[in-house]
Amino acid sequence: MEARAGAGPRRAGGGLGAAGPTSGSRATRTPAAPWARFSAWLECVCVVTFDLELGQALELVYPSGFQLTDKEKSSICYLSFPDSHSGCLGDTQFSFRMRQCGGQRSPWHADDRPYNGGAPVALQREPAHYLGYVYFRQVKDSSVRRGYFQKSLVLVSRLPFVRLFQSLLSLIAPEYFDKLAPCLEAVCNEIDQWPAPMPGQTLNLPVMGVVIQVRIPSRVDKLESKPPKPCDQENLLPAPVVLSSVHELDLFRCFQPVLTHVQTLWELMLLGEPLVVLAPSPDVSSEMVLALTSCLQPLKFCCDFRPYFTIHDSEFKELTTRTQAPPNVVLGVTNPFFIKTLQHWPHVLRIGEPKMSGDLPKQVKLKKPSRLKTLDTKPGLYTSYTAHLHRDKSLLKRLLKGVQKKRSWDVQSALLRRHLLELTQSFIIPLEHYMASLMPLQKSITPWKTPPQIRPFRQEDFLRSLEHAGPQLTCILKGDWLGLYRRFFKSPHFDGWYRQRHKEMAQRLEALHLEAICEANIETWMQDKSEVEVVDLVLKLREKLVRAQSHQLPVKEVTLQRAQLYIETVIGSLPNDLQAVLCPP
């Protein structure tokens, strides 16, 4: 790893910030070894402690070469500790999401394209935000002046693998709190040996004497809620810890207090409505926000969301201003002060302490926002929104029956996830069908003409098509589907979905055009063409080839080989001086 300007000479492993001398494991790394494998999973690891004079303070960042701006450091400090209202004793795990503030990226940073190209859109790397996965410990300690040991270990990543990183923290953090710096450096060196996350692959990830086995989801996966089958276990000692998912939460546990309103909440998420989740602690708030934003899959959640947000956040004023309409964001908070600050928000979900009894907890009630006045506001969904679709009573009956029969929460979660998946698919399939009809016919794509344009999306034409090809074909739910689509057209999710689909269709069109060129007889075409036209073809073919080879065009390998052969054939027909220009030595 090269030293940054002004940083002075530094060995490859990087130091542990303010932690003082570190273990000798660094010496085993070669000076040229970058943190490429580590950065395929994590940006950095932070330790935040409580200082009597400074409050929350960043004790160390590892690798030390990773640069955070002062604003990012401040955000990590505040977001890594529960606020004073939570009263979290013992160990607590939660997560947060914060905006990147520019600054120089790591010199070892990985290229996102190979992973993003194969990953489901909802699981692609965050381009402009960091995700923080926190393990916070607060225990009585008479040796500390305040009487408490308070420290957080934070994994900072751009991957939304909440399940994997929480499992990783539950292995690392207890050990780190006992052994401190050397343990953390050893773990980071182990992560730097992991294979990169490649969609569709099952990976064995060794850490601290344990092997975590995970499967990285792919965009070509069948959408279902079955855990992956363990594989390659016979050669592994000890036997691996198999995670059924890298990202899925226990949806039934998260939604337990709001099961009667799951469909209303699904609609609010679909429409990108501003929503505040006021919870008793950061773990409850972050899990509820992540559960809500995941219930649109396979759609990507295109709005902003903050699983845990505090009044100290640098974006507090921006997100809570009354001078403009509330932004399209789902905000997880624990400080009751937010009830007063965000009274003008249209939807507030107040949830109480989680109940771990065998019965279904008391369901929150729908309440008018005008009743949201006091800091001791009771649990409820405070909104004036009226759902467009009728409630699916059969789902609630099946879930209640599962509770009575003591059905496992995994099965309950799978049932709930399937219901939400089918609901989203029923809503999206008519849009997909209509969008596909806007694609030019393949027979209209000819090799030597610019391919025809994708026809524009006309909302009224689409709404008329619903009469014979609407969601009623795949969904039994009745209601005002038309009204839901009309509101969806105004939401960030329609814009995000349309842009993604249009981009994919444009790439497909370009790929079909390249295939048409490669299937044509290029020598016949060249017979009556000027040198300018032939050179123009070479340049255009090269451009298409570069785009195709960088995973931007869905073309077969044989087409790429044929295009390269065509370029060589065309260049070979040109005079020597032009050949020298097009193929410099």
Image (cartoon, grey):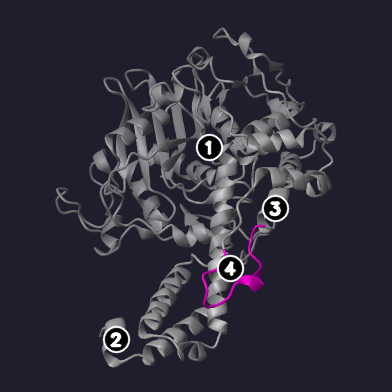
Residue 445: in magenta span? yes
Calculate the distance from the C-alpha at mark 1 to the C-alpha at mark 2.
51 Å
Of callouts 1 and 2, which one flags the residue occurring earlier in the amino acid sequence?
1
**Residue plotted at (48% across, 81% down):** 563
Tell me the SS state at disc 1: loop
How many residues crowd around disc 1 within 10 Å: few (fewer than 14), some, or many (20 or more)?
many
Element under label 3? helix
Percent across and percent down for residue 48 are: 35, 33
Among numbered discs 1 and 4, the one appearing first in the sequence:
4
Nearest-to-viewer mark from 1 and 2: 2
The amino acid at mark 4 is Asn
Give the magenta-colored segment's residue range: 438-452
Mark 3: amino acid: Tyr
* Mark number, residue 578: 2
Mark on residue 434?
3
What is the x, y in percent for residue 279? 57, 22
Nearest-to-viewer mark from 1 and 4: 1
| Residue 141, visible in the rendered structure | no
Q: Residues within 10 Å of mark 4 (few under 14, many from 20)?
A: few
- Label 2 or label 3, whichever comes before in sequence order: 3
| Nearest to the observer: residue 125 or residue 74 | 125
The local secondary structure at tag 2 comes to: helix
